[in-house]
Image (cartoon, rainbow, N blue to C red):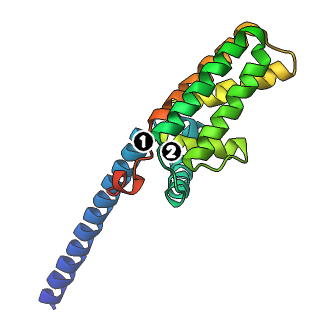
Amino acid sequence: MQNEHVVFALVVAAVAVVLVVALLVAQKRSRQRSGALRDQFGPEYERALTQHGDRSKAERELLSRRNRLDELDIHALSDAQADQFSAEWATVQQRFVDDPTGAVNEADRLIKDVMKARGYPVGNFDQRVADLSVDHANVVEHYRAARTLARAREEGQVGTEDLRQAMVHYRALFSDLLRTPHVATSLQHAHA
């Protein structure tokens, strides 16, 4: 009878050790996934945390964005396309002197044209921002800021200096979109 108790105690202890090890492995993987998402999404990770108020919900949202983008055919621009868009941007910037509102509207249109040429869907603004946040997390806030300023101008709430700032924000995203090819995210986050 005493041997049965010893065997039972050893089995319970072994199961407890296995459970503790499994828990530690799960926690390590979770930290690694969180770190990889924080590295990939940068400031967008913190924004998602604030928006969702819960790390797991925020991370599910960011993973969903990444998975959505993996299904799209996002690609770099050809040299000819990049040159054409650069020339268009120069024209938009020159237009700003005589027509700041028109130039800001054209900058917004040009961003959508570049996105479309790269393979991004361009329907809903919030979806565009979510899609851009996967590969352009460090500049996507510029897009939000430019859009906010452009909308405020439509309502007569901002002046020319604010529109100039909107152009600066659009230029940051435009430059990043022009020179950044889509990285095969499945290779980037294979360990996540």
Assess disc 2: are there few (<14), some (14-19) or many (≥20) residues with their C-alpha within 10 Å of its C-alpha.
many
The quarter of the picture where the C terminus appears is: bottom left
Q: Are dots 1 and 2 in contact, CB under 8 Å?
A: yes
Task: Give the labeled residue for mark 2.
Answer: 134
The residue that appears at 65% across and 39% down in the rendered structure is 113
* Residue visible at 12% across and 88% down in the picture: 3
The circle on residue 59 is: none
Q: What kind of residue is marked 2?
A: Val
Residue 44, percent across and down? 53, 37
Q: Nearer the viewer, residue 192 or 86?
A: 86
Q: Nearer the viewer, residue 88 or 69?
A: 88
Position of residue 8 measured from the top left corner of the image (x, y, whole percent) = 21, 83
Closer to the camera in the image, 123 or 87? 87
Picture coordinates of residue 19 (x, y %)?
29, 68
Image location (x, y in percent) of residue 87: 58, 25
**Cα–Cα span, label 1 and label 2:** 7 Å
For label 1, the SS is helix
Q: Mark 1 or mark 2, which has the lower sequence index?
A: 1
Residue beneath label 1, please? 40
